[in-house]
Image: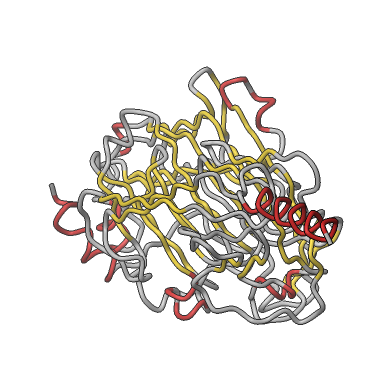
Amino acid sequence: MYFNYAAATLAALLPLCSAQTYSQCNPLEKSGCKPNPGMGSSLNSAFTTGDGALGGWITTAGKVTTSGQGAAFTLAKRGDAPTIDTNDYFLFGKVEVVMKAAPGTGVVSSIVLESDVLDEIDWEALGGDTTQIQTNYFGKGDTSTYDRGTFVNMASPQADYHTYTIDWNKDKTTWAIDGNVVRTLNFNDAKGGSRYPQTPMRLRLGIWAGGDPDNAPGTIQWAGGKTDYSQAPFTMYVKSVNIVNYTPAESYTYSDNSGSYQSIKTAGSSSPQPRSTSSTPAANSSTESSNSTEPEPSTEAVTESATGSETSATGFITTTGSTTGTTTGSASSKTGAASTTGGSSLSTGSPSSTGASNTNSTSTQASSGTGSPSGTESGSGPASTTSARATTIPLSNSAATPYAGSLMALIMAFSLMIAMF
């Protein structure tokens, strides 16, 4: 198929412009921009239940309806581009969208995380390509190169619903389809982190005609050709959206023009800290750290403990006890007692989590379907998957730790020797 041979060239050479990416007030370019309203800890929208599920969203273009198939984004005529945004922003988080992409040559179904400074993380399905979907990202609206996009082989995005996941963390971002990771972007791979998306985002869902005859020739070619409106309507369906905000807050404010996550100040939450991930924790070690290089804390950090944290297979975090600080783990992992280093603001963020971790089993998967996670991936091909398992030795004395009984026996023997004298 055409896309299989031309995807890499198009991703590298053609502008991937979307009718739905914009910023009303870029705080790196303008003063007086209002703080971003914070989402809180999560947002769950089951669009199959009716229009009430659109609460928490704002329609920015066209009209979106709901039915038993979910939220319907319909391109019925030229100029249509129905789009909705979340009302609120989140800073690092996990986004799961159950979507069936729209058919039609040149028709683009999009899942976009975008910030006011034009940091962006995308899924884009082209209606004429029934074997692939595209992943992409942008940092600070930098379009000087177009080598970030990848095409991922998959079953038809237009024929069935699939769960598209973006797990966005301060040290890395992963894209997954139906639970299988298909791409990983590390912080340092995005021009040393300077183009790594790291500012508060909203989620944007929509459909648009990349193949509209008035678009630039490069955009039409990337979209797969001109859109034939006589074949309309073209409809994208979204059954549900689940978002977990790793840095809950009432609002986010840019404190300077660096555009770094450390510059983001939060209000309405106590010592928020972005979630840090570690793919394979080192055995026999009480310190877990990411591979990225980030600034040291600028203020004195405090140590807070999280107890009884459990991550379900979908990545949603349920906790008992105190849970302030960095949550470390992956799908299908259970963590006992762990201590993390938090701080008074995001400027104190450190990519390491220091303390004892009793991990029963931690399973991670990483795969690459379209190239290496260097930020310059392109091309296509079947995803390959690797997995690793690591267990950390607990540092506390308990029934599972043999040292407790030995120590007690030693004390009793010593006491007996004294009594004999």
* Residue at position x 34%, y 62% in the image: 149
- Dividing the picture into quadrants, the one containing residue 366 is bottom left
Asked if 132 appears above or below 373 in the picture, the reply is: above
Q: Foreground: 239 or 357?
A: 357
Q: Most extreme residue toward the top, as rendered?
A: 68
Q: Is residue 352 left or right of residue 210?
A: right
Where's the C terminus, which quadrant? Answer: bottom right
Q: Position of residue 163 (x, y in %)?
A: 44, 36
Numbered circles on residues, count: 0
Relative to the observer, which residue lies in front, 289 or 1? 289
Q: Foreground: 37 or 212?
A: 37
**Image check: 384 left or right of 260?**
left
Residue drawn at (54%, 79%), measured in percent from left and top?
293
- Apparent side of residue 343 relative to residue 313 in the rendered image (left or right): right
Residue most extreme to the front: 421
Instruction: Tell me: residue 52, above or below residue 182.
Output: above
Instruction: Name the foreground residue: 46 vs 18.
Output: 46
x and y, in percent, of residue 202 in the image: 63, 53
Residue 99, x across and y down, in percent: 44, 34
Residue 111 at x, y = what percent?
Answer: 48, 47
Model colouring? secondary structure
